[in-house]
Image (spheres, helix red, strand yellow):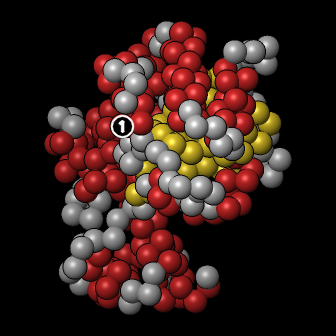
Amino acid sequence: MKAAGLPVLALASFPQPAARTPYYCAQLETHVVQFPHVNVPHTHDFYLLLYVTEGAGRHTVDLVTYELRPGSLFFLAPGQVHHWELAADTRGFVVFFDTDFYLFRYPGSGLYAYPFFDSAHPPVLYLPPTETDIRPLVERLFAEYGASHANQAEVFRSYLHLCLELAARGYPALPAAEASPALRQIRQFGALLNEHFRTKRSVSDYAELLHLTANHLNALCRRALNKTASTLIHERVVVEAQRLLSHSALSVAQVAYELGFEDASYFVRYFHKYVGTTPEGFRQQR
């Protein structure tokens, strides 16, 4: 049986009013109501921009949580794991695009070289309130997406290219603390955790993959996230267990199997230890 892992959303996951296009744009407040599943941890096979115009909240990308406020412009590359917590009054825009859509007109060397799509850099640009270049372009992207012109794709792609180029121009140099390898290693740990949490449950497993000692990895996690690496591993397993119990018809034994537990009774004890109730009890509470 194939493991049911973290949701990997494709553009086809977001129904569009006309024929499917390799790009998408919507108002954030409409998007989160129409697609409530985007509020739980997931990843994509496309690029994503999130521009916030009003409100507040938190946006967690590859284990690291960032403030979400007016002027926040987030960039996610395919494969990054994220979720957000938005205040009720949060407004803004989301933009999705497939790699091939961008590469049809612009070189891959440019797309892959943008600093905000590199895990060594933070995935957010905080624009000042006086910024008047990028916001109008994002608004034009939204307006163009709702239009029906024959050259809509070309115009949309041009606005998108300008957004990325202007964002790269304004991207700040990394401060010394951010330029250190610590945050990069945390993000790499997050990526490895999402890939291997069903089969690797010890800190030493991940430390070996990162070419670190277990003590060093724990110290990094405590400094950056105020949690041990072991806690993060257990949280990832439990979150996936809760997702399967909430959104699938799998039995508890099948959920245990999906998560790599050979003994269902041990999975029940593990779940109870970290959640405070049994898997069946958790499911009945939903």
2 shown above or below 100? below
Where residue 214 sits, quadrant-wise, is: top left
Left or right, residue 15 beside residue 232: right
Q: Position of residue 54 (x, y in %)?
A: 80, 36
75 shown above or below 79? above
User: Residue at 43% across / 55% down in the picture?
Assistant: 10
**Quadrant of image for the C terminus:** bottom right
User: Residue at 38% across / 37% down in the picture?
Assistant: 99
Left or right, residue 133 beside residue 275: right
User: Residue at 53% across / 85% down in the picture?
Assistant: 283
Q: Position of residue 184 (x, y in %)?
A: 36, 29
Q: Is residue 58 visible?
A: no
Which residue is label 1 attached to? 100
Left or right, residue 123 beside residue 66: left
Kind of element beneath mark 1: helix
Q: Position of residue 77 (x, y in %)?
A: 42, 37
